[in-house]
Image (cartoon, rainbow, N blue to C red):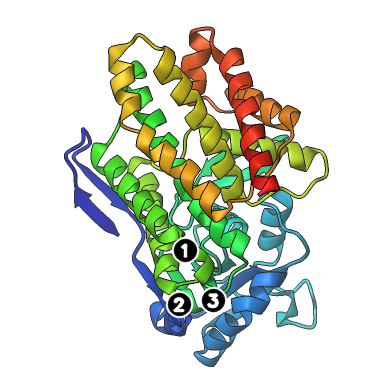
Amino acid sequence: MIERKCSCARGSHRAPLEKYIVGENAIEQLPAVLHDYHRVYVVCDENTHRVLGEKAAALLRDAGKLSHVYVLPGAVLPDATAVGNVLIHLHDPKADADIFAYSPRPDFILGVGSGVINDVCRLVSYRLGIPYGIAGTAPSMDGYASAGSPTLFDGTKATIKCTTPKYILADLTVMKDAPLDMLLSGIGDMFGKYTGMLDWELAREYTLEYYCKEIADEVLAATDACMRCGYTVKERDPQCIKAIMDGFMVTGLGMAFTGNSRPASGAEHIIAHAWELSDVENGRKPHLHGLEVCQATRIVADMYRLLYRETEDARLKTLIARYLPYFDAVDTFCDTVGMPAVTDDYDTILSGIRRALPLRDRYTILFYLRDRGLFDRYAVYAAENAVKKARTHDEA
């Protein structure tokens, strides 16, 4: 359990995470970390099983701690099918010749993977009351230490409140060899904190929503560190990968401390979720979450830039002005490094912005604009800019 005092209105924060281990060959510490557990259920997908799952299982088997391994087949989404499959295979059907025989209940769930695996294992862990941990395979998203699981169900995507993992292992030897798009996705996910923290401040100013300055400042500092290291990400420097993972830990713990996802997301994440829902509904494989967030971050930043130019509210102008250098830095980074855009289609971009407005009841710039009759004009403006930026990248 992590506990600390804070100067915010709550006075203190706590999260159930017990240990975060990051370093080269960190997976070797797995048996020692799980010393109190003896029936570990390992969950992975076909790719993460090959990359790290087999080794994790072997280490646990040699230590006499492995219950069994379940490999989710094919392309896995964070949906009811994946959750159901992990639940069904909780008891090892190979434990007895009779496939309906009852095998001992696992005492720990170990996810091996990144976003989807972590979200599915977290939800199963929380609903069954079995502790879980995650052995990360790619620094591609910020949810490792989160207490919520974004899940597709009933035609929408919502974050279900769960719990943080007890243990997180980030093996830099494995992570640095992740596909480049996944590394860029991790940085892109962190960039969303710039617009997310401004949205949080906006909610504090205009709705009196709870806000923790200490957590927000830590998140911004962690995002700055990712920005600095990101220019060398293509060199696969382990220290760059560590900076990204450390950023994920800051935002994840921030979510656990506050009990919501404010320290990690704002309008940019809601727009990204809207695009993902559209892909799923139309039978398309969703893009990497962090790449969606990065493009949506630039969209939301353009909305804030326009609002800064047009508003006569001095308080709002002062608030936005603090974030403009962050927004400029994101644009420079994306143009310099060649951050992939997930779409350059105007209708797709605009429909995602419009769908995001009712998708989640969270006060962001989208609500601010709606309440003042500005939403449609700003959405069109931002979508047009997004198309230009995406096509400039494609031409480069």
Residue at the extreme right of the image, as rendered: 283
Is label 2 in contact with label 1 (beta carbons under 8 Å)? yes
Residue located 56% across and 43% down the image: 293
Q: Quadrant of residue 29?
A: bottom left
Query: Horizontal and vertical percent for residue 10?
Result: 22, 36
Residue at the extreme bottom of the image, as rendered: 62
Disc 1 packing (10 Å; few <14; some 14–19; many ≥20): many
Determine the secondary structure under disc 2.
loop
Q: Which residue is mark 3?
A: 174
Query: Horizontal and vertical percent for residue 19?
Result: 35, 68
Label 3 or label 1, whichever comes before in sequence order: 1
Name the amino acid type tagged 1: Pro
Residue located 55% across and 41% down the image: 159
Q: Is residue 184 left or right of residue 319?
A: right
Q: Which residue is mark 1?
A: 131
Q: Which residue is mark 2?
A: 37
Q: Nearer the viewer, residue 226 or 228?
A: 228
Task: Look at discs 3 and 1 and give the one toward the viewer.
Answer: 3
Name the amino acid type tagged 2: Tyr
Q: Nearer the viewer, residue 280 or 309?
A: 309
Residue located 72% across and 71% down the image: 46
| Marks 2/1: CA–CA distance | 10 Å
Determine the secondary structure under disc 3.
helix
Disc 3 packing (10 Å; few <14; some 14–19; many ≥20): some
Name the amino acid type tagged 3: Val
Task: Look at discs 2 and 3 and give the one toward the viewer.
Answer: 3
| Marks 3/1: CA–CA distance | 24 Å
